[in-house]
Amino acid sequence: MFFLLEYDRRKGKLVDIASFHNVDRTKAENQRLVLEMELHKLHVDREVVLLEASNEDALRRTHRRYFENARQIGQSVRKLGSSCFLYDIGVVLFTPFQLGLVTHMCFRD
């Protein structure tokens, strides 16, 4: 599935989320472009990102910064222990032609 997120960085809040089935990738990419152009036209500074995940629960785990505040993320990192660092990145679609892929990693010394 693909998820189109509109995020207000200044407020640290998710404004909107829309989901698209895998067969609707082009529709999702087009909707991202339309949303970015609309926000630019209105001079609204928001982050618009198109992400891919198996479901919304997986998206919430891999891209927690869009769904949790810094305190919540900090508390869960502390639970992992001081020698473990969690990198919370997943599949991100930067443009229709670029795809970056990283998964959860935990490094212990």
Image (spheres, rainbow, N blue to C red):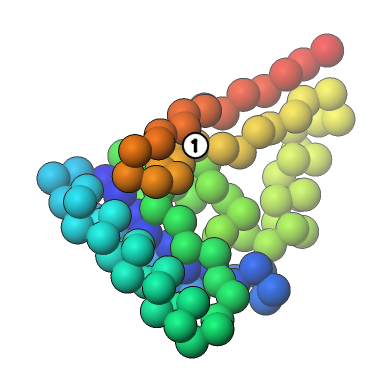
Q: Nearer the viewer, residue 41 or 49?
A: 41
Q: Position of residue 24 (x, y in %)?
A: 16, 51
Tell me which corner region of the image, top left, top right, bottom left or bottom right, holds residue 12.
bottom right
Task: Please report the residue visible at 61 percent of the width from the left and 38 percent of the height from the top.
Answer: 88
Number of numbered discs on residues:
1
Q: Is residue 78 left or right of residue 100?
A: right
Does 34 appear above or below 92?
A: below
Say whether residue 77 is visible. yes
Tell me which corner region of the image, top left, top right, bottom left or bottom right, holds residue 99.
top left
Q: Residue furthest top?
A: 109
Q: Position of residue 95 (x, y in %)?
A: 39, 46
Task: Please report the residue visible at 68 percent of the width from the left and 32 percent of the height from the top.
Answer: 86
Task: Please report the residue visible at 59 percent of the width from the left and 75 percent of the height from the top.
Answer: 45
Task: Please report the residue visible at 55 percent of the width from the left and 81 percent of the height from the top.
Answer: 44
Does 72 appear above or below 12?
A: above
Q: Residue furthest bottom?
A: 42
Tell me the crowding category of disc 1: few under 14, some 14 to 19, or many 20 or more residues within 10 angstroms, Cα based.
Answer: some
Residue designated by label 1: 90
Q: Is residue 12 left or right of residue 28?
A: right
Q: Is residue 1 left or right of residue 77?
A: left
Say whether residue 21 is visible. no
Q: Position of residue 40 (x, y in %)?
A: 49, 77
Q: Residue furthest left?
A: 23
User: Tag 1: residue type?
Assistant: Gly
Q: Is residue 31 left or right of residue 108?
A: left
Q: Nearer the viewer, residue 34 or 3?
A: 34
Q: Nearer the viewer, residue 74 or 79?
A: 74
Element on which disc 1 rests: loop
Tell me which corner region of the image, top left, top right, bottom left or bottom right, holds residue 53.
top left
Q: Position of residue 18 (x, y in %)?
A: 32, 65
